Amino acid sequence: MNEFPKILSANWGKPNSAGIETYLASGGYEAARKALGMEPAKVSQEVLDAGLRGRGGAGFPAGRKWTFMPKDNRPRYLCVNADEGEPGTFKDRDIMRFDPHMLIEGIIIACWAMQANNSYIYIRGEFEEPAKILEKAIQEANQKGFLGGKIFGKDFNLQVWVHRGAGAYICGEETSLIESLEGKRGNPRIRPPFPPQKGVFDQPTTVNNVETIASVPFIIREGIPAYRKFGTEKSPGTKLFSVSGHINKPGVYELPLGYPLMNFINEVAGGMIAGIKLKAVIPGGSSTPVLRAEECQNVNLDYESLAAAGSMLGSGAVTVIGEGTCMVKLLEILTHFYAHESCGQCTPCREGAPWAAQIAKRIHEGKAELNDIDVLSSLGANMMGRTICPLADAAACPIIDFPKKFREEFEAHIRNKGCPQAKPFPVEFK
Amino acid sequence: MPVKIKINGREIETEAGKTILQAALGAGIFIPHYCYHPRLTIKGSCRMCLVYVEKTPKLQIACATTVAEGMVVETENEEVVKARQSVLEFMLKNHPVDCPICDKAGECSLQDFYMDYDGRPSRLSPLDSKSKKGKRVPMGQTLVLDQERCIMCHRCLRFMKEVAKNECITDAKRSDRTVISTFPGELVDDPYSMNLIDICPVGAWTGKDFRFKKRTWLLTRSSSVCPFCARGCDIFIDHEKGIVYRLCPRENEEVNQSWICDQGRLAYPAINDNRLLRALSKNDGRLQEISVESGLSYVAKLIGDHQGKILGIVSASATREEAEAFLKLIRASGGEVAGNFRKEARDDFLLRRADRDSNRQGLKQLGIDRPAGDGIVKADLLVVLESLYSEPINGALGKKMAVLSPKRSELVESALVALPIASYAEAEGTFVNFEGKAQKFFPALELKGDAEPGVMMIKKLAIKLGLEGK
Ligand SMILES: Cc1cc2nc3c(=O)[nH]c(=O)nc-3n(C[C@H](O)[C@H](O)[C@H](O)COP(=O)(O)O)c2cc1C
Ligand code: SF4
Ligand code: SF4
Ligand code: FES
């Protein structure tokens, strides 16, 4: 790891970091005790003022989201989104593996703020180990009286449940997650109604990402200024970045928001693999727009800087693409993923993604004409902004961007009647 | 609360809470749509109804966007037209385009909207394949599904869940491999399942009985009322050259909404087959064809000979007009009139009534409320007015009997004389349903053979008996 301030990953290197005693020794559950002594609305306000934004991809202010919960007598739920299915994103997994109690404490605080008595952690089905660790941590927290009835002597009870998914990327989308949690097929729901009005079992529900919730205890324990000491004015705090691709040290890193992208790649993450040159970066998970190397130069890893560069911070999954990578092949792979994962409800997504995947494959194989590039781009344009959930937008984004930003490469495939390179990638991964 | 919006420059007054699509349709502005169905919950997935709404960054779906005061909507601007074309292009990407052999051809909204809003040549490269799915999946006793024609509007799923209350189908698999399917090892077994054929906007759900039988545009569509139970669902009789090919629901908010039951739908072969086309009289124990005129004289003679000892029995599915004329005739001849009723154990939750007759209430209003029972033994002559679906009468066989019937029934076989009358499909008349709602209908088909409308036949008898002037 690095020498940066550690909020989320503070305990990761410690022996038995997932055990409750380790967490307690580092001041764990003090924040929850403190929060339960506060007015619930005050807790939401603190989180809002700390500037914590959703880490699941969209970056919506967490404190504000909590205030959307109606103040009526219906049962209400917090769903923690641990589906983590997006290619390149693998940060929540480490929170759950190495410090599950930080997540649980965050859940207690969030549930108190929203006065929810039940919380579901919807965890990606393949995450067998993290699920077991979570189950054990919940048991420990129950035994200590941090969960269950009369928490910290308050007239407040809370149950936390782990629900394992069944292997669909789309179930990470919040309304699909809710359907799946209810035992149904994970087709996203049309909004309105939004989850705070009609969520799990038709009751008020908030869905937050694992990292969002795990960031909460620090804010409550240490206070707003302590949190805002890190990051930028508009993007305060720290964030986990999962870096993969043609990089020497792939992995999960906690950085203050606003850290320069190129420094991250070249210094923190050990630089480009085998000394190859940087070609492009997908900075926030496969759903965010690709940046060419020259577009990355002055970009910082925060919401505003990446937006200004035409991309997004997303989930903080930095995919590093080295020179020698065939962007047509990469598009084929990405599009194949979305084509496979579309739930199949919306016409543009169901038909557009697989069609685009077919064309990208043909271009790569040299069975295409110039016109196919235009058809491809127009399919992306026709998918964008026209569906129930943003999966189609995510799929459309590279379909539009790749042929635009790497036009010459696409045309070379047509001229050459196939990929001009001997291998689509400069390095073989094992 | 009234709300004013503007669609294509036209000011429209609508109600708060309505969607743009509802407001537009209400004002006679058509916005094409697939997944939207007025009787089902909003799905919002087909994307055919995309429209431009001023001050919103992207196109909105008209079916799920509620109106707001002062909203300005465009349904035909360039952006909308292009989006629509694109949706159609996507729908056709994996569609087999087997219209020449599709039962839905001619009444398919994929065909219609393609012609109305797109009409462009396909951009699909011959090198790109279409997704292969089940072409003829048996889905139950009466249904076959073509999964390749499906455009995934989910109307069928919502119908089974929300209307038929029987969640026996689902979408399975994902992406362009998604199919509508039953659960493993199960079939659709539901008294309303054939409504799926109507609400499916394309030819995915097909009825076994109609498959490959008739091009829809050759059919003539006539309005009628289902005679199969006391609900009296409004229906269409679809026919060609005097032959009925299918019955379909006709919308009526107060009676059957947009649905009919499968049993009523599948009752149509009785209109085509086994009809009584000639007057018959028994000679040496065998029925022989005679002229209607001779038949009328024979019946009149029998009635005249048995004054005061006649029991009239009328089917509760005869029209109110038939029953009225029949009652008058028999009373004038000194007879009594009883009803012939069909009955089931109970009503169901949707449409089907335990009373299996369409004019039960109409008979009641005439004071005909009980079955013949013992009266049959006491009577010397039975005069029976049958309908298409009336059942044999207990104890009637072997009695002296004159029958007016639209079909070659068991009673006709044992009658001394039988007169052919029109069925509801060839007659004009009224059914009074279980809620007292009188529904008038008109002939869908020409009269068959020598048959005449029941009312006419009875009138002619009355004239013969001197009860009525010419
Ligand atoms: C296709 C799709 C997949 C998603 N997958 C995830 C996921 O795995 N984890 C996650 O936290 N959010 C995911 N999201 C975002 C969620 O819908 C939701 O915005 C998020 O959980 C909200 O949490 P936050 O406000 O704390 O960021 C996904 C969204 C889409 C459209
Ligand atoms: S956009 Fe795609 S994944 Fe999302 S609801 Fe529509 S079809 Fe499903
Ligand atoms: S089978 Fe028909 S009704 Fe059902 S989803 Fe497909 S197109 Fe819609
Ligand atoms: S009719 Fe509006 S999305 Fe289908």
Image (cartoon, coloured by chain):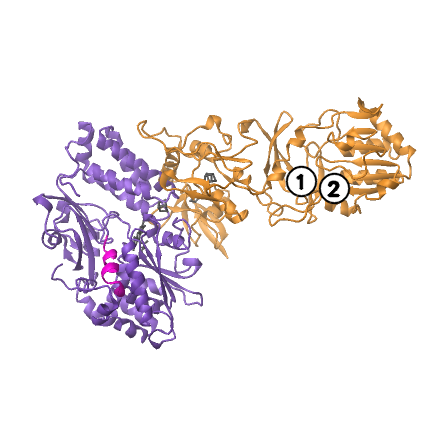
Mark 1 belongs to chain:
B
Tell me where residue B377 sits by quadrant: top right
- Residue B116 visible to the viewer: yes
In this image, B139 relative to B306: left or right? left
**Residue A98 among those drawn in magenta:** yes
* Callout 1: SS: loop
Question: Is residue B289 depicted above or below A285 in this figure?
Answer: above
Q: Which mark is residue B316?
A: 2
Q: Colour of chain B?
A: orange
Residue density around tag 2, few if under 14, some if 14–19, many if 20 or more, within 10 Å: many
The kind of residue tagged 1 is Phe
CA separation, marks 2 and 1?
A: 11 Å
Q: Position of residue A120 (x, y in %)?
A: 36, 60
Q: Position of residue A311 (x, y in %)?
A: 22, 49
Residue beneath the point at 74% across and 25% down: B277
Q: Nearer the viewer, residue A91 or B11?
A: A91
Q: In the figure, the purple chain has which letter?
A: A
Q: Nearer the viewer, residue B69 or A257?
A: A257
Residue that badge 1 annotates = B228
From which residue to which does the magenta span run? A90-102
* Callout 2: SS: loop
Mark 2 belongs to chain:
B
In this image, B334 relative to B36: left or right? right
The kind of residue tagged 2 is Ala
